Structures are given as structure tokens and as C-alpha cells.
Amino acid sequence: MYFRRSDRHILLQAFIIAIAVWAGVMIDRWLLKPRESEELVRIEELTDAIGTTQETPSSVSAQASGSRGGLSLPETFPFDPNTADSATLVRLGLAPWQAKAVMHYRQQGGRYHRTTDFKKVPGMTPETYERLAPVMSIGRQFCYYDDHEIEADEAAYKEQRRVKDSLHRRRSDSIAALDRPQKYREMTVLELNAADSITLQRIPGIGPLRARKIVEYRERLGGYHSVSQLAEIKVVPNEVAPWLRVDVSLVKKLQVNTMSVSELARHPYMGFARAKAIAQYRRAHGRIADITALMLLPEFTEVAADRLKPYLEY
């Protein structure tokens, strides 16, 4: 039979493809061939050592119940069937082939979610299970919860959280009560520019917030020149005025002829526009003698000048 050159090429290509397919199949089978893990090898070695290669499940079950001639008695200690290795399972009284079955079950993705799931181990006798159940511990990551158990856990967590928060609030209230200053029982007049926030809280009607606001505004002003200025703080009631007096000698003055624009502008009554007008006046006319010179500027109305007058020094 004669084949043309093109036919020979086709046959050669088909032969090469067939060889490649056959080689791929063999390599795939070799790569996917299950390999015994170290634990399974250990089980086989243990099986060979004790001469149980020909045992049947029924005979091994009988041995597990106490007739394992020549072997040490099974131990009983806490374990997790999801993490215990094969040697541990054998020490606990399982036959090697049972330990092998447990390892295979876990390798296939199986997990023991409840203690009772361990009853499903092939060849597990009631006596062995009753002995191991009290010491068996299922890790939280393996536990299975149904809806009722989830609801019970959430309710228990919420109750625990509520009790904890309640104790924390009581403790905080107790500490706050100990730290809270005692109120004056009789009329006591305090100096507004010298009293700190703790002392101010002893006045009826002044708590931590109002005391802090009074001190903060005093620092911005440089001091109060009148108790009536407290009305500018919205949270402070008028009823506290009889408890306070003012020493004007403690007021910090603004040096009109030497301070920069930014320093003057920080004062609540001044602002940037009036501070800039003062700086321009100084450059154009020199030193400022008194408040009347400032009242010539459009930025200084009569009301603004009256508010600033106690704070200016020339």
C-alpha cells in the first residue's frame, strides 16, 4: 500500500496526538493517585506491629471492650475528635482501623459537630462511647448551632451585656458622686475672675458644663469686668449672679499701641476688622491716646467702644 507524502504526515500527527493523550492520562492518574498521609502510615505500622492485619470489625470491637490480649488498657483523657491524631485515638481505646476511619472521614471534609456524632464511628460500642463522651470536647469552630441555640446564645449574651453595662453605670455614678463638689448651703459670694471650675460648681445651678463655659469665656476675654457678662454665655442662668462679684484689677488689658493685628483680633469684642483699623490708624497717625480717637473710625460704633473700653490700655 502506498501513502502519499501528505497522508504520511497526517498519520504521523495522529500517532503523536495518540501518544500525547495516553501520556497525559497516565500522568494524570499518577498525580491524582491518593497517597497515604503520615498518620495512615503510622496506623498501618501499628496494625502490623500488633498482628491485626486480618482483623474484622466485629473482632476489633470485641477487643475494644476489654479483650485486646497483650495490649495496654485504653486511656481516658480530654480530647477533640476533630483535632486528635490517630495515635491519640488509639490510646483512647479505638482500634487502629477505627482511628484510620476517623482520619479518612476528616480528610474528606467531615466534622464532628456534636458529641453524639462520635457514635457514628464504625464499630463504636456503647461502652466505649459512654466512657469517652464525658471527656470529649468539641471546639467552638466545629460546633453546630440550630436556630433555638443561636437565639438562646444571643439572649444570654444580651443579658450578660446588660448586667455589665448596669454595673459600669453604677460604678461611674458612684465615682462621679464622690468627685462632685458639695453645694454651698448658704449664700457665698465668689470672685468671678479667680474661682476655678471646681469652686464654681459649688454654686447652686452651676454644674461641670456651665463651670467650664464660664472659665473658657473668661480666658478669651482676659477676665470679666461685670457679672452681667455671664448673660453672653447662653447656658448660664441669671440666678447665679448674686453668688458672684468681680475684681476689675484682675482683668488683662489689650495694649492698643503695641499689639499686632492677630493678637488684638483674638478678643471676642475686637475681631479682625477693628484690629486692622487700629493698625492702619497707628501707621497713619502714630500712637492712639484714648478711646475717643478710635471712635472716629467707622468700625468703632458707640456700642462697640463701650464694650471694649474696660479692656483697652494705651
Image (tube, grey):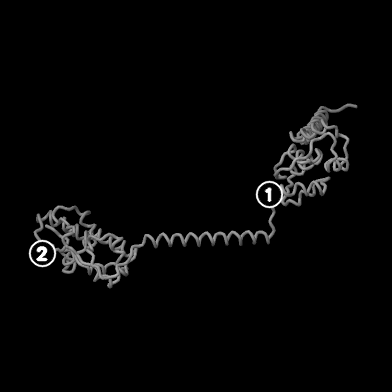
Query: Where is the C terminus found, in terms of image quarters?
Result: bottom left
- Residue where numbered disc 1 is placed: 142
Q: Of helix, strand and loop, which one carries label 2?
A: helix
In the rendered image, residue 61, in percent from the top left (x then y), is placed at 85, 43
- Residue where numbered disc 2 is placed: 292
In the rendered image, residue 184, in percent from the top left (x then y), is placed at 29, 67
- Residue drawn at x 24%, y 61% is 268
In the image, residue 53 sits, relative to residue 266, either above or below, namely above
> Which of pointers 1 and 2 lies earlier in the amino acid sequence?
1
Viewed as shown, does residue 186 lie left or right of 152? left
Viewed as shown, does residue 75 lie left or right of 188? right
Viewed as shown, does residue 166 lie left or right of 23? left
- In this orientation, does residue 17 appear? no
- Residue drawn at x 74%, y 37% is 87
Res 35 → quadrant: top right
Which amino acid lies under the numbered mark 2 shown in the image of this protein?
Thr
Viewed as shown, does residue 293 lie left or right of 126? left
Outermost residue to the right: 1
- In this orientation, does residue 307 appear? yes
In the image, residue 142 sits, relative to residue 201, either above or below, namely above
- Residue drawn at x 30%, y 65% is 202
Query: Where is the N terminus found, in terms of image quarters?
Result: top right
Which amino acid lies under the numbered mark 1 shown in the image of this protein?
Phe
In the rendered image, residue 275, in percent from the top left (x then y), is placed at 19, 58
In the rendered image, residue 5, in percent from the top left (x then y), is placed at 82, 27
